[in-house]
Amino acid sequence: MIAQIFSWALVVLLFAASLAILLTRDWRRSLAFLAIQYLGVFLLTQTHWTLSMAAVKLVTGWMVATILGITRTALDPELATSPDRSLPESRLFRILAAILLLLVVFSATTSLVDLLPGIGVPEVAGSLILMAMGLLHLGLTIQPLRVVIGLLTVLAGFEIIYAVVETSTLVAALLSVINLGLALVGAYLLTAGSDDLEAI
């Protein structure tokens, strides 16, 4: 019973972190919430993986946030402060869209639990919440940093549900490499975007 309550608390944490990423306009806060999101992923996958394997997700996530943060800090402040080109910009719309996605997730959770034996309802709910919020994030922005954060959120949701199905160390390492690869691509896009602005 206590483990179930703890798992649902982690689901609430994942939703709150992904919603905060969606709502905030400050890149520092976005990366901080991304780090909190990876903490929730680590704690939720720890129920099915060993502590050392689950810790790989946490360390990788924090490395990803560090890579993106260092790259963003190194940019010229005048070039880096481009307006948030996302539609629509209303926070109320984003909150309502997130609540709508939350309702869709909870309606689809029970049917997915029946398809995947051995997985708990909180794990499925947390996984679907992150994938849905990541896709919503991708649909609302074109900024390189925010696009990479959206992709990382979708991948984090996939990792939660995949941790139940596969407990291979090699797969955990491969997922970590994919996360780091996305961070490096994001760092490249950030620097390439600043170079284009300098050329103008």
Image (tube, rainbow, N blue to C red):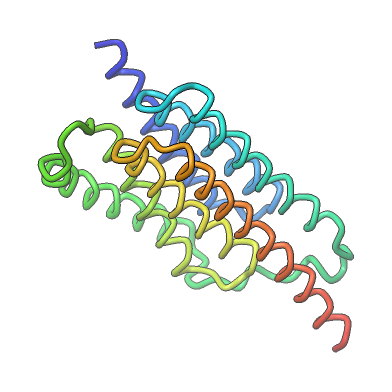
Q: Where residue 46 appears, x then y in whole percent?
A: 42, 25
Residue drawn at x 27%, y 19% as measured from the top left: 4
Closer to the camera, 169 or 155? 169
Q: In the rendered image of this protein, does residue 12 appear above or below residue 137?
A: above
98 sits left or right of 149 in the view: left
Question: At 51% from the left edge and 58% from the top edge, which residue is drawn?
Answer: 150
Q: Nearer the viewer, residue 100 or 179?
A: 179
- From the image, which quarter does the C terminus lie in? bottom right
Is residue 147 shown above or below 7?
Answer: below
Name the residue rendered at 58%, 44% in the picture. 34
Decide if residue 109 is on the left or right side of residue 102: left
Residue depicted at x 23% and y 48%: 103
In terms of depth relative to the viewer, which is nearer, 120 or 91?
A: 120
Q: In the image shown, does 88 or 133 lie closer to the viewer?
A: 133
Residue found farthest to the top? 2
Q: Position of residue 151 (x, y in %)?
A: 50, 59
From the viewer's perspective, is 180 left or right of 126?
right
Would you identify the image quadrant in which residue 62 lies? top right
Numbered-mark total: 0
In the depicted structure, whether residue 93 falls above or below residue 4 = below
Give the image quarter of residue 154: bottom left
Q: Quadrant of the N terminus?
A: top left
**In x, y percent, where is residue 177?**
58, 51
- Give how far across and how far down residue 108 sits, in percent: 17, 49
